[in-house]
Image: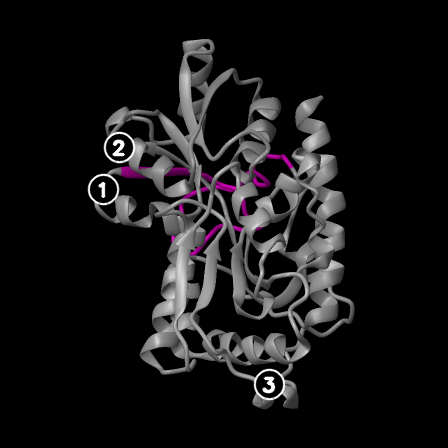
Amino acid sequence: MKLTKRLFLGLAASSALATLPVSATAQDWEPTRPVDFTIMAGAGGGADQIARFVQSVVEANDMMNRPLIPTNRGGGSGAEALLHLNEARDADHTLMVTLNSFYTTPIRQDGLGVDIETFTPITMMGVDPFVLWVHTESGITTFDEFVETVREMDGEYVMGGTGSGQEDSIVIAFMSSAYDLDINYIPYDGGGAVARDLAGQQIMATVNNPAEANGFYAAGDFVPLLAFSDERMPAYPDVPTMRELGHDFSYYNQRAIVGAPGMSDEAAAYYREVFGQVYEGDDWQEYLASESLSPLPMDEAETRAYWATQVETHRQLLADIDG
């Protein structure tokens, strides 16, 4: 099963994707204390980088009368963050930056008692694909060489990721099945830690988002071998996609901001206005381009339709992994 940009766009409740509407009620409410800006992942990963970039844009442009307080809560593949938001005592001052573990973790950990349909859609900031990376000193420069090396090592080839059932593990599981690869997978708390350990050659390969790996790539430490995107990425024009190799598969990670269950309409409208301004601003548009993210604006109805489809899609993907 593939998660293409076309599929993402097709999830909208209407044929046109509009920018998030600003309700007049947004003018009737403002935060009265600092806003909890929970990050559903560990430090240094894509979600963490995006959250702190967004926070810096809001602060630099005086968009809010109270500060956003970024806090990493990536434990249990994001379960810590989900529970924190689900049990928020002050829903109007509690936000979360999500990735696809927003769907996979409640499916994998049914005992959490978390129903994402009760959360409050705020803003979809974009989606980004995954790329297969190796260290430059590995000597591997093509995906064919990667496949040959993994097969030769017969179960001893080590890749890092953010945990079983998480986004990268879905991608690695598909790749392993398609090419009959036996990979030793080591879980980490976040994509930042995964990228750092590849840079330190503690692991042999990763499937990281571009934002998590670009610094190491620019420094000459990483080599991109394969993109799990619909088309070749402008940042890596010589890197083939999985689809080019004959496998109709691509996978994108969402970068969204959601509110706690029970958030008031007035508070939700306020945050949609703030993050809508961030989204439309030059800083964010330049970030989308530099970090190879794709724009994907949605209104509340479109977001809820998107959530419902993603739950079912990831339920099937995880079932395929579990065999």
Residue pushed farthest front? 89
Say what amino acid the circle numbered 1 marks: Gly
Residue 309: x %, y % from top left: 75, 52
The numbered mark, 2 or 1, whose residue comes first in the sequence reads 2
Asked if labels 1 and 2 touch by Cβ distance under 8 angstroms, the answer is yes
Q: Which residues are magenta?
A: 222-247
Q: Is residue 141 above or below residue 149?
A: below
| Residue located 35% across and 38% down the image | 193
Count of numbered circles in the view: 3
The numbered mark, 1 or 3, whose residue comes first in the sequence reads 3
Q: Is residue 214 above or below residue 16?
A: above
Question: Which mark is on residue 220?
Answer: 1
Q: Nearer the viewer, mark 1 or mark 3?
A: 3
Asked whether, in this view, residue 12 is left or right of residue 232, the answer is right
The numbered mark, 2 or 3, whose residue comes first in the sequence reads 3
Q: Quadrant of the N terminus?
A: top right
Residue 100 appearing in the image: no
> Can you identify the residue that label 2 sits on?
136
Residue 145: x %, y % from top left: 40, 23
For label 3, count other residues whose C-alpha is less than 10 Å away and answer few (under 14), some (14-19) or many (20+): some
**Element marked by disc 1:** loop
Q: Quadrant of the C terminus?
A: top right
Say what amino acid the circle numbered 3 marks: Ala
> Can you identify the residue that label 3 sits on?
26
Q: CA distance from mark 2 to mark 3?
A: 50 Å
